Amino acid sequence: MMGPWKLCRIVWRLFLSILSAWLLLALLWALLPFPSGGQDINNGADYATKTLLGGKILRRVYWKYAEVPDGSRQGFALDYQLNISSRTLAVSGLEKPIEIFRHASAEGNGHTEEVSATARAGDTDGANLPYFPEADALLLFWQIHQEYATVPLRLVWSTQEAENVQKFDILLNDQGHGDNALLSLTMKGNHTSTIRASFSPEPRSSSPSSTYPLRAAIIRALAPFSILLAAVFGPLAALFGFLVSWMFKGICLGLVVSGVVAIYLCYSGKRPHELVDMLGDELQKVRDSETMRKWRESDSAERGAAGIPGEQKKASTETGDDVV
């Protein structure tokens, strides 16, 4: 049968193992590099084109305040994935993919639709470290808080007949942004290999680093145990903070007293050992004062009175022994 101490040791070792794994993951999360892979070249257009034509997910963070149930966040994120064969674009937060060049004709030139996308929203603070790239920080913030914002979008299909270019734009459907597209796609003729993606300078946007997916997986593993640690060590942290506060106050008081003593020595012309001797003399005067003498006498009398019964008992015992 397993005893209580053995069970405690097993639980303690399990806790230490989990804590060690947590610390290792935390170090990995903090020290991983942030390779951009040329994502910022040409405002991310080359990277976006390569990603979409490769059938991969293009993740983009936009720095435009987004309203969430508890207030607002610094920005929001949308994911895009292009299906070359069907010429459709899947946008995160929309129910179905968009046929990107379906209205690209003389009759449908300038066709517009209004939709609303549910976008991930976040800030750059929280558990993020100061040197994290903004796009990574916002998405990692979202991994913990899981907040969404409704983003109104305007979809525009157009053609440039002189150059035989078809164009599809996703714009913010609000005042102040005009024709600044969140994402623009162009295609020459009917050749999908000529599809090019681009972003407008405003609102400012960027893509996360290539190590973001790994960091996201790490933060999902760290979050539950971090909550447990906060629950366990929260009261201890409060006590530690209280003690540190009082220690700081004591140090400040010591510095003030030292400053006063230094000023006194400076203006009185006395040396430190003279001040010590003077304080010693004053303490000796206090010890030799009438009040202290009476206090010592009363204390001695109380101790003597407390010792009398014991002495009487001892004397009685000795007398009884003599009689026997």
Image (tube, rainbow, N blue to C red):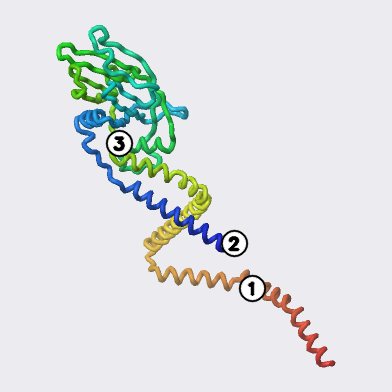
What amino acid type is highlighted by mark number 2? Pro
Q: Residue furthest right?
A: 323
Spot occupied by residue 177 in the image (x, y as percentages of width and height): 30, 19
Q: Earlier in the sequence, mark 1 or mark 3?
A: 3
Residue in the foreground of this view, choosing between 113 and 269? 113
Q: Look at the image and tell me in which quarter the N terminus lies.
A: bottom right
Question: Which numbered circle lies on residue 208?
Answer: 3
Q: Secondary structure at mark 3?
A: loop
Question: Which numbered circle lies on residue 87?
Answer: none
Q: Residue furthest top?
A: 107
Say few, some or many: other residues with alpha carbon within 10 Å of mark 1 (under 14 / 14 to 19 / 20 or more): few
Alpha carbon distance from label 1 to label 2? 54 Å
Name the residue at 54% across, 71% down: 285
Residue on which the image places disc 1:
296
What amino acid type is highlighted by mark number 1? Arg
Q: Are marks 1 and 2 in contact (CB under 8 Å)?
A: no
Residue in the foreground of this view, choosing between 294 and 31? 31
Relative to residue 150, is residue 231 depicted above or below? below
Spot occupied by residue 71 in the image (x, y as percentages of width and height): 44, 28
Residue in the foreground of this view, choosing between 275 and 17? 17
What amino acid type is highlighted by mark number 3? Pro
Name the residue at 34% across, 49% down: 28
